[in-house]
Image (cartoon, rainbow, N blue to C red):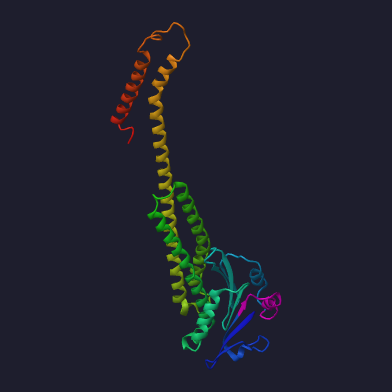
């Protein structure tokens, strides 16, 4: 589907204009959105708009890394929209000209729909009219970046909850949750860091349409991406600390179990020795026919075991 939004020189807002009827000299600027286009509609990027073949090829072969390419009087943006459920990304391509913005995405995206509705509601505003298609590009980028925050906030809530109930689950379960959080943070980082680098280039570029006038708006988006990057790094450090803590806790528990087993083994070693000696089948053995031999040996074994337990307890081996 292709939808159009045009602003006339008299600030009139028009939608639903067919590309065959549209003449750019009749409008101050226009936004054309390729919303899940068919192959025939996608071909218009080349046959109707005559965009550079390399840019058109990038639109058809997803997913490209977020980037900005310059083509004479046209800037080509590759942006990433985040899926909050899977943390996967969908590509949004923008062709930004002096009086034209063409957005291209292979499937319908709520974030682009929200930007469309916002521009449509405020298109009568003189500031929107004066900014031209740059205002549409900024609005799309702003909505894309704003959608990153809820996913990161959700991870931070899970991380805080995991930290609070750290002693109520097995170490294996806690470690699995920590590695799951680290994996999701890595997915976010792979999306957000390239977008941050792209906005840094936009803010510091002198070739983006009316960049000097709108630099403050793109700088605001860049600040949001910097905040997101800092939050991700802080959360990754926290998960690393939790991981190290759980590994140490698991090692301490293993050491405690080994110490307990060692103490029990040491206690039974002399008892096993005595039982082994008196279990030998020799005919001529001292105390073999002694009337009190059995109770005496049992008493010796009991006293020896009790004495070792008391000695180990005194040395703190059972703590």
Residue 247, horizontal then vertical, whole percent: 43, 45
Residue 134, horizontal then vertical, whole percent: 52, 80
Q: How many badges with numbers are in the image?
A: 0
- Residue appearing at x 56%, y 68% in the figure: 67
Q: Is residue 306 left or right of residue 93?
A: left
Q: Which residues are magenta?
A: 33-49
Q: Nearer the viewer, residue 66 or 161?
A: 161
Furthest toward the top, the residue is 284
Q: Nearer the viewer, residue 214 or 286?
A: 286
Q: Is residue 240 above or below residue 199?
A: above
Q: Split into 4 quadrants, where in the image is the N terminus?
A: bottom right
Q: Is residue 231 above or below residue 102?
A: above
Asked whether residue 55 is drawn in magenta, I would say: no
Residue 290 lies in quadrant: top left
Residue 176, horizontal then vertical, whole percent: 49, 51
Q: Does residue 205 appear in this view?
A: no
- Residue appearing at x 51%, y 56% in the figure: 183
Q: Does residue 199 appear in this view?
A: yes
Q: Is residue 184 left or right of residue 44?
A: left
Furthest toward the left, the residue is 314
Q: Is residue 53 left or right of residue 169?
A: right
Q: Is residue 82 above or below residue 244?
A: below
Furthest toward the bottom, the residue is 10
Q: Nearer the viewer, residue 26 or 86?
A: 86
Q: Split into 4 quadrants, where in the image is the C terminus?
A: top left
- Residue appearing at x 46%, y 67% in the figure: 150
Asked whether residue 39 is drawn in magenta, I would say: yes
Q: Is residue 102 above or below residue 21?
A: above
Residue 65, horizontal then vertical, whole percent: 58, 64
């Amino acid at each position: 589907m292709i939808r159009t939004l045009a602003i006339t020189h008299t600030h009139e807002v028009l939608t639903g204009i067919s590309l065959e009827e549209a003449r750019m000299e009749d409008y101050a600027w226009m936004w054309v959105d390729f919303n899940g286009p068919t192959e025939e509609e996608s071909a218009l990027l080349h046959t109707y708009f005559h965009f550079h073949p390399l840019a058109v090829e990038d639109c058809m072969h997803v997913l490209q890394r977020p980037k900005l390419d310059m083509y004479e009087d046209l800037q080509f943006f590759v942006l990433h929209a985040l899926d909050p459920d899977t943390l996967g990304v969908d590509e949004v391509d923008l062709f930004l000209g002096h009086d034209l913005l063409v957005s291209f995405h292979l499937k319908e995206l709520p974030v682009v729909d929200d930007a469309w509705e916002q521009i449509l509601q405020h298109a009568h505003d003189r500031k929107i009219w004066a900014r031209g298609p740059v205002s549409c590009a900024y609005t799309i980028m702003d909505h894309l970046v704003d959608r990153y925050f809820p996913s990161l906030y959700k991870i931070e809530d899970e991380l805080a909850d995991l930290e609070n109930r750290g002693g109520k689950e097995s170490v294996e379960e806690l470690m699995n949750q920590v590695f799951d959080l680290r994996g999701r943070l890595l997915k976010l980082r792979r999306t957000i860091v390239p977008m941050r680098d792209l906005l840094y280039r936009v803010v510091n570029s002198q070739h983006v349409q009316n960049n000097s006038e709108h630099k403050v708006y793109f700088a605001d988006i860049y600040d949001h991406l910097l905040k997101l990057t800092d939050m991700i790094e802080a959360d990754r450090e926290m998960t690393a600390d939790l991981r190290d803590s759980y590994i140490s806790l698991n090692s301490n528990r293993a050491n405690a179990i080994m110490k307990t087993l060692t103490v029990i083994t040491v206690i039974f070693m002399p008892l096993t020795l005595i039982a082994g000696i008196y279990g030998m089948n020799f005919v001529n053995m001292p105390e073999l026919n002694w009337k009190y031999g059995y109770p005496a040996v049992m008493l010796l074994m009991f006293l020896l075991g009790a004495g070792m337990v008391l000695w180990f307890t005194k040395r703190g081996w059972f703590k």
